[in-house]
């Protein structure tokens, strides 16, 4: 079976997500955070991720990374109106396992 091909929506993106053996530190930490949130039935938000890694969250931080990992299908961005504001969180995407099994290719 061939690799799943993906293309970033942002032309500035340099993220490949081709080889999980060469996973970058941000990708590794974010995927671990997604797994933990799923395990403890929590919503994996950008703000929560920044709290976990000990950095201050500012809108726009690593926006190309978050867009690219979503475009690759490794994670899925979920959004819903909670009555006060639009809440967004991440879950495992359709290509999560493909990535971990070296099955993604950026085109």
Image (cartoon, helix red, strand yellow):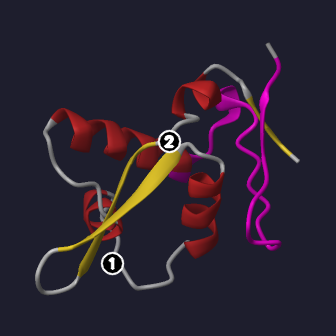
Mark found first going from the N terminus, 1 or 2 = 2
Compared to 56, does 103 lie above or below?
Answer: above
Residues 9 and 30: in front is 9
Residue 31 rendering spot, x and y as whole percentages:
44, 42
Compared to 81, does 1 lie above or below?
Answer: above
Disc number placed over residue 56 in the picture, else none? 1
Compared to 23, does 107 lie above or below?
Answer: below
Q: Quadrant of residue 62?
A: bottom right
Question: What element does badge 2 sit on?
Answer: helix
Question: What element does badge 1 sit on?
Answer: loop
Query: On the rendered structure, is 33 left or right of 73?
Result: left
Residue 93 rendering spot, x and y as whole percentages:
48, 41
The residue located at (52%, 53%) in the rendering is: 26
The residue located at (33%, 78%) in the rendering is: 56
Residue 103 rendering spot, x and y as whole percentages:
72, 25
Query: On the rendered structure, is 100 left or right of 90?
Result: right
Q: Quadrant of residue 19?
A: top right
Query: Main structural element of the magenta stretch: helix, strand or loop?
Result: loop
Query: On the rendered structure, is 49 left or right of 10?
Result: left
Quadrant occupied by the N terminus: top right
Task: Report crowding for label 2: few under 14, some 14 to 19, many 20 or more residues within 10 A (C-alpha).
Answer: few
**Highlighted range, magenta:** 2-26
Residues 53 and 36: in front is 36
64 part of magenta stretch: no
Count of picture labels: 2
Residue 79 rendering spot, x and y as whole percentages:
33, 67
Q: Which residue is mark 2?
A: 28
């Amino acid at each position: 079976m061939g690799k799943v091909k993906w293309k970033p929506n942002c032309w500035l993106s340099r993220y490949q997500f081709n080889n999980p053996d060469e996973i970058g530190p941000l990708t590794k930490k974010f995927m671990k955070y997604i797994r933990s949130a799923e395990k403890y039935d929590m919503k994996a938000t950008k703000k929560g991720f920044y709290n976990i890694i000990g950095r201050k969250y500012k809108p726009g931080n690593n926006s190309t990374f978050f867009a690219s990992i979503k475009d690759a299908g490794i994670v899925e961005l979920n959004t819903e109106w909670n009555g006060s504001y639009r809440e967004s969180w991440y879950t495992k995407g359709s290509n999560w396992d493909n990535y971990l099994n070296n099955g993604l290719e950026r085109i």
